[in-house]
Image: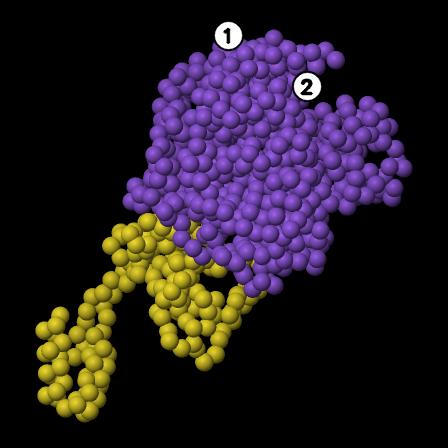
Chain colours: A purple, B yellow
Amino acid sequence: MRYAETGFNLEVDLTRGNIEKVATDPKDTELYLGGLGTNAKMFWDRVGPEVEAFSPENLLIFGAGLLCGTPATGCNRTILTTISPQTKLMAFSMMGGFWAPELKYAGYDKVVLRGKSEKLVYLYINNDTVELRDAAHLKGKGSIETAELLRTELKQPKAQVAAIGMAGENRVFYASVEQGRSSASRGGMGAVMGDKGLKAIVVRGTKDINIAEPVEYMGLCNEVLEYIKYREDHPIPGVMPILAGLGSPQEMKVHDEKWHTENFMWGNSRTRRKDFWTEDIQKEWTETLESTRTRLISCFNCPMKCGATISMPGLPTYMMKCFTKLTYTMGAFSDLNFGLRIAQKATEYGLDGFSTPQVMAFALELLENGILKDKDFPEMPEDNEGKFYYLLDKIVKREGIGDILADGTYWAAQKIGNGAEEYAHNNIKKTEQLPLKLSMLNPIYFLMYSTGEKMNITQIEGQFPQAPFPKKEHREKFCEDWIQVPDEKFKQYFIDWEIRGDNSIPYYPTVEMTCDIVDWMERMHYIDDALGQCAGLSSFPLKPPYHIHNYPKFISAGAGIEMDEEKLTKAATRYRTLVRAINVRRGMRRKDEKPPEDHWKKRFPELEEQLLDGYYKMKGWNNDGIPTKESLQNLDLGYVGEDFIKRGILTDSEDTASKEASAQEEKK
Amino acid sequence: MGEKEKKIIKTIKIDVDKCNGCRACEVICSAFHASPKYSSNNPARSRIRIIREPLRDVYVPVYAGEYTVAECAGRDKYTIDGKEYDECAFCRASCPSRDEFKEPDSGLPLKCDMCEGEDEPLCVKWCLADALTIEEREEEVDEQVEQEDLEIGLGSLVDKYGLDKLMDTVARMSEKD
């Protein structure tokens, strides 16, 4: 018997309309756990570097995490993986909600989609019944609307639906897959789903998920619940309120937006408004949210209430979470009322809330600066907010300038030319980032931004405080019950970290310490992404209930795989390296690993190089960010090393040849 | 006649305004009732279900009650505060008219047993939103009515089979136990 996982995937060939239920190899679970780990293995095996985002050979995987569907609190994430049209790399994006557990209860761990359907279809999964069905009547429908229509017409009120809106159908590069209050937004998952002609996946399941050691597992689950209660009663002092508790940043709950509105950038990630947050604005925004927020809501089996139902007068109800609350507002220099209204439309269209407002603000900046002309925006309304609605529609329908903007700021700037590239200034690996511009380089954040392959800092950071506390006694106090550290040395790193002086950024934490810290944070996110655990109870907040010390026990007792901290660390390193290898095979190198030029005012080129050197070395990668043959072998990834040698990415003798080759390339 | 007996009444108080729709109650219920305990879980086997329609702000936990062989003569449909609920939404019965509160494979009825043997029903323990809380109180219940019912029932059996035969049968049944 298989525990925690079902042991079966659904393989769906959309070109031929063929569906197969395929048993998976338990050995793969041991090596790559599940979720992102096993998704990555499939990509390595089946999606070569020649495959493009919109090739029929591209896969789009909906992978439930290894522990999804078990009683582990907050373990509900689906990990979507595909080749991104925006980055041209393998991208992965997670969504919470209710979909992954339902898929497990239907008897499957993953839905693996390939090919392209000529007609728009949807996939219906009801336990053993799995069918592709005509979706002509859903064309152009909103993502939430589609879910409601399908549940009603199928008479399956308990079914969970992941759907794309018009943005996905029209292959907008930053189209999302929406699922109730959750979405997989980054990397263009929706665009690939639309390209494959798949409007939605409906799933309903009523089967059991088995647990290997039931009593032990339940004990662990209860400990987690107890710790959540403890943390609710003990917010972390000395950090801003949204970082003091557990869960995703509690944007739906809090009214005080002084920190975001005065520290994050407005418009096309340019303008800081230092005295924005006044009493009047606080009053107005509080009133807006209070009068339209019906309820704070949760994902499957989780007590956190990170989402909310929002009913704006005259608009259909929708659900929201996290920072999308402010991205449209700030992109358009408007107010919360506008932000929540346009987000309703954007959610139905199925768009990423980070990229979309920046793309629109970018377009208007190009217009202001004469790079785009009035004729590029025929019949655009005069008022600011009207312009944003106008652009949203143009992008989603790929009409006129919208067709260019639908590819994101990087590709749009390439097409527009004439200096437009300067305005696509907030990208990493061709993807729009949080609108944050700071003064002094932070070595920890430099490494996370540079080397992250998740494209969103909130899905890379966590665990280690973002900044030192002013007083040593406070730092010591913080360390007293810091049980989550993988090693005691992290406490010392933090205690010695000062706001000013020798032990302050950018030279402290030292290169070595920074690498350790980043490695820890990254490891926790990668573990979450294989298990299906929401980062909000694990890798994102300080002092979370899940950590490196209890995770191995969860895996042992839940999935029946013998596990300890060392073995788990190795597994996470293994598939993290595999993700890197897939992207190296697609051409990603050191030169691609950099934050936006203007992310910090004060930069330290020499230190930055040392940081990258140190990180690569710690990872067992060569100086160009390519895993070496030896380190691959140590991770049971010998097959990757062989492939690299065959392709000339690595040479047989040593790992330096490729560095020379890329240096040559740089000179050109 | 009229003797009073003390009885513990357990009431699960359901505050639908506090429900966040996470269905942790369904998860722990099905895990607790798995055999062996906690060896599997499957919300479709749960003895509590959340009626959950986020877009209409409908969140109602309902517990499985008694099994019934026949459906009611008519059905009911509630509208509360402008929210319309499905037919028979709040009914606790495992009933032929619907799929609720039945084992998904065998169709056997499910019934909430308040997690016998535990300090409190586990759905309550796992509801950190406090939508589910438990209250216990002691009540004195009148035994008289039950006694009357019993006598009427036995009387009709005596009429039908005679007192001797009935007493023999009772004696034989008690030996078996």
Q: Quadrant of residue A256?
A: top right
- Residue topped by disc 2: A597
Q: Is residue A122 above or below residue A422?
A: below
Within 10 Å of disc 2 (Cα), the crowding (few <14, some 14-19, many 20+) is: few
Q: Is residue A378 above or below residue A641?
A: below
Residue B114 placement (x, y as % from top left): 31, 58
> Which residue is rendered at x = 58% and y = 59% of the image?
A151
- Classify mark 1: helix, strand or loop: loop
Q: Toward the viewer: B39 or A359?
A: B39
Question: In the rendered image, is residue A527 in sight?
Answer: yes
Of marks 2 and 1, the one in the foreground: 2
Relative depth, front residue between A587 and B98: A587
Residue A502 — which label? 1
Classify mark 2: helix, strand or loop: loop
* Relative to B125, B138 lies left or right: left
Q: Position of residue A476 (x, y in %)?
A: 39, 19
Which amino acid, by three-letter code, is at mark 2? Answer: Glu
Residue at image coords 57%, 42%? A61
Count of marks overlaid on the render: 2
Residue B120: x and y in percent read: 30, 53
Asked whether residue A546 appears in the rendered view, the answer is no
Query: Which one is in front, A348 or A333?
Result: A348
Residue at image coords 21%, 89%: B156
Residues at marks 2 and 1 on the same chain: yes
Q: Nearer the viewer, residue A215 or A366?
A: A215
- Estimate the x, y position of residue A581 in percent, counting from the top left: 56, 26
Kind of residue sitting beneath label 1: Asp
Q: In terms of sequence position, does the residue under pointer 2 or pointer 1 come before the other?
A: 1
Left or right of B26? Residue A185 is right
